[in-house]
């Protein structure tokens, strides 16, 4: 991924471990790179957060017996992560639901359920007062 800084392209997602040939090519193309220093996760928090979740929720819990199995399990996790799992950054909605425009429907259902729960709690308090 690249952006323009002062009219010149700057690659923003380059790791310092890129091969020298790629670095030379970037220099010849007049592209500057912004490196993410090793052991500096705060420089790219989004990918570090994702990597941590991948490690904690999948890699540390599985023992892969083959590359084929690893690919299959990782694909299942990816589908669950992108289509089922609720993400706090987008209001505890699954990314697929947000992309499909279901966010408003989901929030309306949450509001309806909260209103029902509040009403049940109000009625329970009222009944408790009558008994006392």
Image (spheres, rainbow, N blue to C red):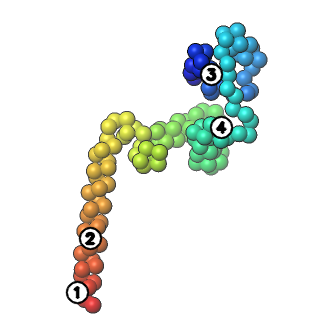
What residue would you read off at disc 4?
43
What residue would you read off at disc 1?
130
Decide: marks 1, 2 in contact (CB < 8 A)? no
Q: Residue at x 65, y 37 (%)?
A: 43
How far apart marks 1 and 2 lie (CA) works out to 15 Å
- Label 2 sits on a secondary structure element that is helix
- Label 3 sits on a secondary structure element that is strand
| Mark 3 / mark 4, whichever is N-terminal | 3
Q: Quadrant of the N terminus?
A: top right
How far apart marks 2 and 3 lie (CA) works out to 56 Å
For the residue carrying disc 2, how many other residues have a C-alpha within 10 Å: few (<14), some (14-19), or many (20+)? few
Decide: marks 3, 4 in contact (CB < 8 A)? no
What residue would you read off at disc 2?
120
Answer whether residue 62 is visible to the viewer in this image. Answer: no
Q: How many marks?
A: 4
Q: Nearer the viewer, mark 2 or mark 4?
A: 4
Decide: marks 2, 3 in contact (CB < 8 A)? no
Q: Quadrant of the C terminus?
A: bottom left
Q: Residue at x 22, y 87 (%)?
A: 130
Give residue 112's position: percent from left, percent from top. Answer: 26, 57
Q: Quadrant of residue 113?
A: bottom left
């Amino acid at each position: 991924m690249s952006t323009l800084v002062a009219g010149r392209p700057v690659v923003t997602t380059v790791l310092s471990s890129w091969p020298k040939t790629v670095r030379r090519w970037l220099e010849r193309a007049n592209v500057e790179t912004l490196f993410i220093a090793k052991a500096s996760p705060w420089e790219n928090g989004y990918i570090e957060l994702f990597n941590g979740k991948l490690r904690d929720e999948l890699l540390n819990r599985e023992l892969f017996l083959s590359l084929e199995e690893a690919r299959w399990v990782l694909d299942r996790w990816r589908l669950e992560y992108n289509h089922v799992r609720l993400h706090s950054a987008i209001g505890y909605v699954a990314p697929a639901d947000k992309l499909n425009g279901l966010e408003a429907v989901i929030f309306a259902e949450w509001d309806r359920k909260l209103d029902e729960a509040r009403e049940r709690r109000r009625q329970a308090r009222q009944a408790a007062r009558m008994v006392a």
